[in-house]
């Protein structure tokens, strides 16, 4: 059902390239890529200090509005990944006790789609709607957005220190306020002139070229030091019975692949091979250990 066209880390270690699609067979016509999950091997082995796990979701109906988080004048995969990461952390904070009052689009979860709907309603609707009057003062304004944000923020103790560093406001060494990703999003979603884009439509083919800031949420960090496990899930629709009948792997809606940069391995191997060639003895222990 799903296949990788490309999955690799560029030789310079700056980008992780993922190109994945649904097989071009009529029975899959209504299927699409549901999610792409990228995890480092170190993360899977329990080393929480290395790498980052996130799931950028490409589905219809999410209602999330993406904004120009990094201020470069365009909405790129970097902005999408940051917004999706914010949404993941909100889900982590609220997953077990979300209040229906704050689930404004009534989809069963409290997430950024609700905040986007709240901001849009306040800006574009003059008619009073009690569902959007969260602080119950019989008005619809910025205070209702602050009420929604406060509700989410009260669960911040459920985040790790690393997640708080990304999510919340903080101060630099000189005492200057650095706005965290969550409040950056809130400011932009409430700004009518900010660059915004609705969530993407269902896609049968997705190509990503991710940098270290997309994967680790840190700039200029080489991707060559990790093995990345990429798991792709497809949304199965259409004639599901016909898809199941195909069997033999054709009905599998998940695909897992691995990406790493082989160039450092090649370089180390050649250095050891050259080192061996320069010596008169026959001790190849380092080279043999490397190969094993």
Image (cartoon, rainbow, N blue to C red):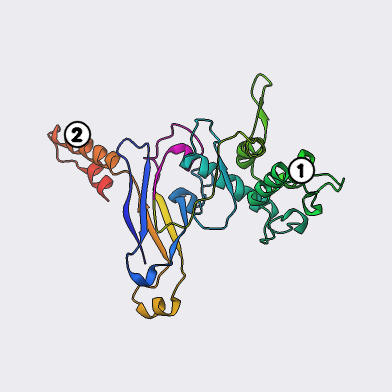
- Residue, far top: 174
Instruction: Work out whether residue 106 can be spotted.
Output: yes
Magenta-drawn stretch contains 5: no
Q: Quadrant of the N terminus?
A: bottom left
Query: How far apart, in angstroms, are the residues tagged by discs 1 and 2?
Result: 62 Å
In the picture, measured across the screen, residue 256 lies left or right of residue 184, that is: left
In the rendering, at what x and y percent does residue 179 appear? Answer: 65, 31
Tag 1 residue: 150
Residue count near mark 1 (Cα–Cα under 10 Å), binned few <14, some 14–19, many ≥20: few
Give the foreground label among 1 and 2.
1
Give the quarter of the image for residue 169.
top right
In the picture, measured across the screen, residue 276 lies left or right of residue 209, that is: left
How many marks on residues? 2
Identified at 45% across, 51% down, the residue is 38
Tag 2 residue: 275
In the rendering, at what x and y percent does residue 203 appear? Answer: 43, 57
Which element type, helix, strand or loop, lies under badge 2? helix
Identified at 71% across, 59% down, the residue is 96
> Which of the two residues, 279 or 146, is positioned nearer the viewer here?
146
- Tell me where the magenta segment starts and ends, as one range: 207-226
Instruction: Work out whether residue 45 can be spotted.
Output: no
Residue count near mark 2 (Cα–Cα under 10 Å), binned few <14, some 14–19, many ≥20: few
Callout 1 touching callout 2 (CB < 8 Å):
no
In the rendering, at what x and y percent does residue 112 appear? Answer: 64, 48
Identified at 27% across, 51% down, the residue is 292
């Amino acid at each position: 059902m799903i296949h990788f066209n490309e999955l690799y880390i560029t030789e310079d270690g700056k980008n992780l390239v993922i190109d994945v699609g649904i097989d071009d067979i009529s029975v899959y016509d209504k299927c699409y890529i549901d999610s792409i999950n990228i995890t480092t091997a170190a993360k899977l082995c329990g080393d929480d200090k290395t790498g980052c796990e996130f799931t950028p979701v490409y589905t219809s109906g999410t209602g999330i509005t993406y904004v120009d988080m990094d201020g470069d004048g365009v909405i790129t995969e970097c902005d999408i990944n940051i917004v999706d990461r914010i949404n993941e952390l909100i889900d982590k904070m609220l997953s077990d006790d979300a209040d229906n009052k704050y689930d404004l689009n009534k989809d069963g979860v409290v997430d950024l789609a609700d905040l986007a709907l709240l901001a849009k309603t306040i800006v574009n609707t003059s008619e009073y709607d009690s569902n959007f009057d969260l602080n119950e003062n019989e008005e619809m304004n910025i205070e209702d957005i602050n009420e929604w944000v406060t509700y989410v923020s009260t669960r911040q103790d459920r985040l790790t220190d690393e997640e708080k560093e990304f999510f919340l406001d903080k101060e630099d060494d000189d005492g200057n306020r650095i706005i965290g990703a969550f409040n950056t999003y809130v400011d932009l979603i409430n700004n009518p002139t900010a660059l915004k884009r609705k969530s993407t439509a269902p896609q049968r083919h997705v190509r990503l070229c991710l940098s270290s800031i997309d994967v680790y949420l840190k700039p200029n960090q080489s991707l060559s030091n990790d093995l990345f496990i990429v798991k792709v899930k497809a949304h199965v629709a259409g004639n599901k019975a016909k898809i199941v009948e195909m069997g033999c792997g054709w009905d599998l809606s998940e695909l897992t692949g691995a990406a790493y940069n082989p160039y450092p391995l090649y370089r180390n191997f050649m250095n050891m091979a050259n080192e061996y060639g320069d010596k008169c003895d026959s001790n190849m222990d380092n080279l043999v250990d490397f190969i094993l």
